[in-house]
Image: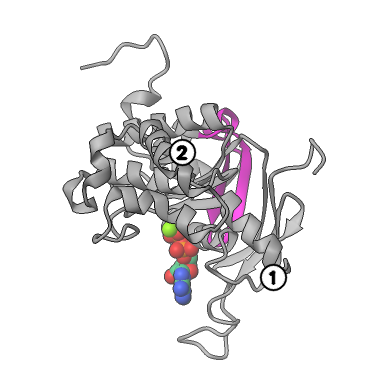
Amino acid sequence: MQPTEPLLRVNNLVIDYSQGKSLFHPNRVAQPAVAGVSFEIAPGETLGLVGESGSGKSSVARAIVGLTKPAGGEILFEGTDLAIANERELRVARRDVQMIFQDPFASLNPRMTVGDLLTEPWRVNRGSLPRSEWASGLATLMNQVGLAPEHARRYPAQFSGGQRQRICIARALALRPKLLVCDEAVSALDLSIQAQILNLLKDLQEELGLAYLFISHDLGVVRHISDRVAVMYRGKIVETGDCEQVYNRPTDEYTRALLAAEPSLRPWDRPAGVASAS
Ligand code: ADP
Ligand code: MG
């Protein structure tokens, strides 16, 4: 890979659940859920993807990690098109690209201890980490996400929502990925916990050089963490640019409407030096 090449390049991605037919109007061609989306993510960069519910954000995320088959376009990871990659190339890419979901409870097997959940990726991906290094690897992972060593023996139900998301993040990090796709990863959490998890993701990015595709319907959250932001509307990206530019000088009509409808800014959005009104 050339140093200037992006880590991920999505080219004209199309995802169509209806195969072109409108469910309720069989004679009318339905608009695909994702209708030609293109963007790039550089190593270590965070691209925010915002847009209202139903705009196609999760479909893009699922296609990148291989959970949804695109109807067209390319998903180039380190130059390899995942849509036409062979088994070996796909296995490598599946390790390098991990995903975190909105509901940590649903993605954690309730019968497994945290220790088992976090070592499972090494068990499943043979050769990823020698067994003799699992104990130290587990300790490192738990420390990285702010879990205490004794948490390894507990089950997911014994944790709060924020702690469960920490477990999911640790699990996603087990195989040392280069890109983390975070789909509404903090949307179900209380505001103070959201801030903690966002700061954790920022710290991990600095420490590990991770790139993020950070997806949320919440503009405040996306602004807090992103270098660049892409705005999605009805299956298309309508605007993309540096975070400050898109938030302060949006050029697209829909972006402006979205910003105008944004609920009051989160406490962390206040410019530095401006005291709290309360
Ligand atoms: P977002 O994450 O922005 O809310 P989604 O990607 O989940 O958007 O959905 C985009 C569109 O695709 C919506 O109209 C949704 O109803 C539809 N859709 C999503 N997943 C499926 C699916 N598995 N089968 C059929 N339609 C789907
Ligand atoms: Mg979604």
Secondary structure under badge 1? strand
Between 203 and 176, the residue placed more toward the observer is 176
Please give the range of residues in magenta: 226-251
Mark closer to the chain start, 2 or 1: 1
Task: State the residue lying farthest toward the bottom.
Answer: 27
The dot on residue 72 is: 1
Residue 233 belongs to the span the image colors magenta? yes
State the separation of the CA atoms marked 2 and 1: 28 Å
Image position, residue 101 (x, y; %): 40, 54
Is the C-beta of the residue carrying label 1 under 8 Å from the nearest atom of ligand 1? no
* Quarter placement of the N terminus: top right
Q: Is residue 38 left or right of residue 264?
A: right
Task: State the residue lying farthest toward the right.
Answer: 2
Residue under the point 82% across and 40% down: 2
Between 89 and 41, the residue placed more toward the observer is 89
Is the C-beta of the residue carrying label 2 under 8 Å from the nearest atom of ligand 1? no
Q: Which residue is mark 2?
A: 222
